[in-house]
């Protein structure tokens, strides 16, 4: 492909930092999507760093679908990532702006703000709260549905050092994360210096 939305072929070998909070969501909690299913949701902030083929930031919401994971909402600050996620794996990426500040040794405290040109939708403060494990493996699959009804199942595998964090989420009523307003995460984890392969050759 050529042009501003050029993206690498599958799989993407990605590196970076990830913070994941788990929330128990009530049915009807999302005023913009009152049919959002109740249940457990993972909300993750990700910073994809060199030597990833694309360097960008991401906020995603996902829920378990049996043994797989379904991404319900996702924003990135890279047009190439948006195009690649949609074309390759049917991941419904949208664009947003991100501001991240860190402090402390090894970036143990981070503050994020996510929104668009008009407003900030959410702010998140995360602080590492304990030691990290040695590097451990992880694997899962995403399950997404294209507009034509076809299902795309994508393998994800990698390694990371895991640790507990604390997180304070602030979501604003006018934004797409309003359904998280006032909610406290059940737990927050950090995956430090992850190395991850997303997808398979050919898709």
Image: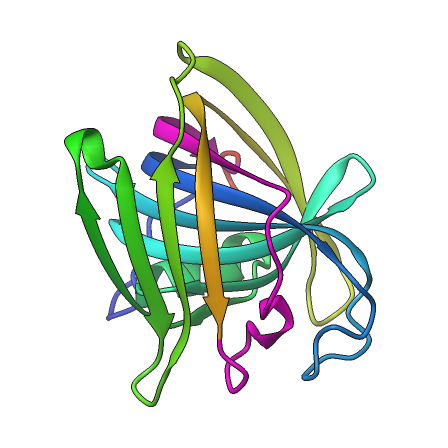
Could you tell me which residue is drawn at 40 percent across and 13 percent down?
A: 135
Residue 186 as seen in the image, left or right of residue 95: right
Quadrant hosting residue 153: top right
Q: Position of residue 168 (x, y in %)?
A: 45, 54
The relative height of residue 89 versus residue 16 in the rendered view (above or below) is below
Q: Position of residue 193 (x, y in %)?
A: 31, 27
In the rendered image, the quadrant that contains the C terminus is top right
Name which residue lies at 32% across and 59% down: 112
Judge by depth and name the residue closer to the eye, 135 or 106: 106
**Left or right, 179 with reference to 136:** right
Q: Residue furthest top?
A: 134
Asked if residue 117 lies left or right of residue 144, the reply is: left
**Outermost residue, bottom direction?**
118
- Looking at the rendered image, the quarter that the N terminus falls into is bottom left
Check the image and tell me how it is coloured. Answer: rainbow
Q: How many marks?
A: 0
Query: Is residue 196 magenta-colored?
Result: yes
Residue closest to the eye, 32 or 72:
32
Residue 71 visible somewhere in the drawing: yes
Residue at the image position 82 percent from the left and 75 percent from the top: 35
Q: Position of residue 74 (x, y in %)?
A: 51, 62
Q: Nearer the viewer, residue 183 or 154?
A: 183
Tell me, yes or no, whether the highlighted magenta stretch contains residue 124: no
Q: Looking at the picture, does residue 34 appear above or below residue 105?
A: below
Using the rendered image of the protein, determine whether residue 53 is visible from the camera's viewpoint: no
| Image-quadrant location for residue 165 | top left
Q: Position of residue 124 (x, y in %)?
A: 40, 58
Instruction: Establish if 68 lies above or below 36.
Output: above
Eyeballing the image, is 27 above or below 55? below
Bounds of the magenta segment: 172-199
């Amino acid at each position: 492909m050529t042009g501003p939305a050029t993206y690498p072929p599958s799989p993407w070998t990605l590196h970076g930092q990830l913070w994941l909070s788990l929330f128990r969501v009530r049915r009807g909690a999302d005023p913009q999507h009152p049919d959002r299913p109740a249940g457990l949701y993972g909300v993750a902030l990700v910073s994809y760093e060199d030597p990833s083929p694309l360097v960008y930031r991401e906020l995603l919401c996902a829920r378990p679908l049996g043994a797989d994971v379904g991404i319900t909402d996702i924003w990135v600050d890279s047009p190439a990532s948006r195009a690649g996620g949609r074309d390759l794996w049917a991941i419904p990426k949208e664009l947003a702006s991100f501001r991240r500040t860190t402090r402390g040794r090894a970036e143990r405290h981070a503050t994020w703000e996510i929104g668009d040109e008009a407003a900030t939708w959410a702010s998140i403060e995360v602080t590492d709260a304990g030691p990290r494990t040695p590097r451990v493996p992880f694997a899962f699959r995403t399950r997404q549905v294209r507009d034509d009804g076809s299902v795309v199942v994508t393998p994800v595998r990698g390694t990371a050092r895991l640790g507990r964090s604390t997180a304070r989420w602030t979501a604003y009523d006018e934004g797409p994360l309003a359904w998280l307003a006032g909610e406290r995460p059940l737990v927050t984890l950090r995956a430090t210096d992850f190395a991850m392969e997303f997808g398979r050759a050919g898709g």
